[in-house]
Image: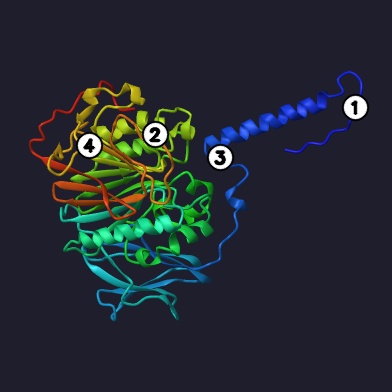
């Protein structure tokens, strides 16, 4: 900050100068504290430039009977999606009721586990379409057939590194192919989808342009991260955040919501909007878990409860206290609701816990009885849980934050079975009572593989955590 003052002489001549210096230091300190808590006063969303480039088709809000198709056009017109089960017979259509450039069309009344072909455009012109434009609807609720999920962590840069991560996933899934609908069925992220400031131009560069061939086929479900929150583009671009396309089966509140794919219940949480989760979100989470009918439950949020990667979850000031808040206030609710797997990002590494319960404090408070299974959970000796959801029956926590960059870090949290400073992403295979989670590094190798099996006799007794959920 540059400050100009009139030169004075005599007693107190430099008082104004010293006051200006004190003011400058105070301003810098306030801005630094604001940055730590996620507020960027020098980059308000309203000041970000508008990106006028079109966006090709992408898929949102997957369901067994519906799908949302989105795109952005260069002109302001009502959008049209034509669709059908054969690429050359798109006999059904949905027309938007008003002209717009950001198009969002909900297709309903679809059959479960079915491939549909589609085109997007206007009444008079097709913007995109052909045999490469298709999607699969989800399996019906309760269907325990195989589902494959790809998880990117903090993927907000597009570079040679992120290209290597994508290619490695595609090659690995091709080598480990299934008799299923496509290489993957669902695409999740753990947040920070566009560095550095969540602008539409950054989403163009980090997502829409490099991944266009994948986005038109695979439903994309992003988590809201702190870099996404710096801009205004996220709620404008993604139906999963603003609830503008409400539909049965997708329970949606702000940046947190839940949905089902077959026998899997997904819970997307917002750990970013405030330095602590508000009571409304916690109440919604309890109610959602109470009504959950899924065999498997996966929760996703940006800030990890346990990490010693590029962030330290033991720090109550780190990331504005969000990681400590997640651990002390959110994790007890998740464990009380029988959540099986919690995914997060933020730290630019891969870290994965043992089967845990009741660890709600800093790492020094971890006790042996909080680790329900101290093995790495390999397929030959998997983590075992009860078929029925029981409170504190064991949860695995995975930090997946290295899909675009890796930072130097200690990687020595005592709750973790595996910690890797490697680029990569995760693939989750779920079929019946078995979940396999693989970390695939940028060379296409399995850096980690653990399994959870649900059985009528898990052989472990859930602990008494000694306190009610917050």
Residue positioned 44% across, 71% down in the render: 79
Residue 50, percent from left and from top:
58, 60
Residue under pointer 3: 39
Instruction: Give the total of numbered labels.
Output: 4
Residue under pointer 4: 338
Quadrant location of the N terminus?
Answer: top right
- Cα–Cα span, label 3 and label 4: 34 Å
Q: Nearer the viewer, mark 3 or mark 4?
A: 3
Tell me: residue 410, above or below residue 178: above
Which residue appears farthest toward the left when viewing the image? Answer: 457
Instruction: Characterize the local packing of mark 3: few (<14), some (14-19) or many (20 or more) Cα atoms within 10 angstroms.
Output: some
Residue under pointer 2: 410
- Cα–Cα span, label 3 and label 2: 27 Å
Q: Nearer the viewer, mark 1 or mark 2?
A: 2
Q: Earlier in the sequence, mark 3 or mark 2?
A: 3
User: Position of 168 compared to 196: left or right?
Assistant: left
Q: Nearer the viewer, mark 1 or mark 3?
A: 1
Q: Secondary structure at mark 4?
A: loop
- Cα–Cα span, label 4 and label 1: 71 Å
Q: Earlier in the sequence, mark 1 or mark 3?
A: 1
- Cα–Cα span, label 1 and label 2: 54 Å
Residue under pointer 1: 8
Residue 177, percent from left and from top:
20, 61
User: Position of 229 compared to 437: left or right?
Assistant: right
Q: Is residue 62 visible?
A: no
Mark 4 touches mark 1? (CB < 8 Å): no
């Amino acid at each position: 900050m540059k400050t100009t003052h009139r030169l004075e002489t005599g007693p107190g001549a430099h008082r104004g100068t010293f006051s200006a210096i004190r003011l400058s230091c105070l301003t810098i300190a306030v801005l630094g504290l604001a940055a730590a808590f996620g507020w960027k006063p020098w980059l308000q969303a309203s000041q970000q430039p508008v990106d006028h480039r079109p966006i090709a088709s992408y898929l949102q809000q997957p369901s067994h009977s519906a799908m949302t198709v989105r795109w952005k056009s260069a002109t302001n017109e009502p959008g049209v999606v034509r669709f059908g089960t054969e690429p050359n017979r798109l006999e059904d259509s949905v027309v938007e009721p008003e002209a717009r450039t950001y198009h969002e069309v909900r297709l309903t009344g679809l059959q479960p586990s079915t491939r549909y072909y589609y085109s997007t455009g206007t009444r008079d012109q097709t913007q995109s379409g052909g045999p490469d434009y298709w999607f699969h609807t989800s399996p019906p609720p309760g269907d325990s057939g195989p589902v494959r999920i790809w998880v990117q962590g903090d993927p907000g840069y597009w570079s040679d590194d992120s290209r290597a991560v994508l290619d490695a996933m595609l090659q690995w899934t091709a080598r480990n192919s299934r008799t299923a609908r496509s290489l993957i069925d669902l695409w999740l992220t753990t947040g920070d989808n566009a560095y550095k400031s969540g602008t539409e131009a950054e989403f163009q560069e980090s997502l829409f342009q490099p991944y266009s061939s994948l986005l038109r086929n695979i439903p994309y479900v992003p988590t809201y991260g702190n870099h996404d929150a710096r801009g205004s583009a996220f709620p404008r671009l993604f139906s999963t955040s603003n609830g503008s396309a409400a539909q049965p089966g997708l329970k949606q509140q702000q940046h947190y919501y839940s949905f089902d794919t077959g026998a899997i219940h997904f819970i997307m949480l917002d750990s970013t909007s405030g330095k602590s989760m508000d009571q409304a979100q916690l109440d919604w989470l309890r109610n959602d878990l109470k009504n959950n009918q899924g065999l498997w439950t996966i929760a996703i949020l940006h800030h990890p409860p346990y990490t010693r990667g590029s962030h330290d979850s033991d720090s109550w000031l780190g990331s504005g206290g969000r990681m400590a808040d997640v651990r002390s206030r959110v994790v007890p609710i998740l464990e009380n609701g029988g959540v099986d797997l919690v995914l997060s990002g933020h730290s630019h590494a891969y870290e994965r816990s043992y089967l845990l319960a009741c660890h709600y404090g800093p790492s020094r408070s971890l006790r042996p009885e909080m680790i329900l299974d101290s093995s790495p959970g390999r397929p030959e000796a998997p983590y075992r849980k009860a078929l029925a959801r029981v409170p504190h029956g064991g949860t695995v926590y995975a930090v997946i934050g290295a899909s675009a960059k890796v930072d130097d870090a200690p990687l020595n949290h005592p709750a973790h079975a595996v910690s890797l400073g490697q680029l990569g992403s995760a693939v989750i295979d779920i079929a019946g009572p078995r979940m396999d989670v693989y970390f695939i590094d940028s060379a296409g190798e399995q850096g980690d593989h653990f399994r959870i099996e649900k059985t009528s006799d898990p052989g472990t007794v859930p602990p008494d955590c000694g306190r009610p959920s917050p």
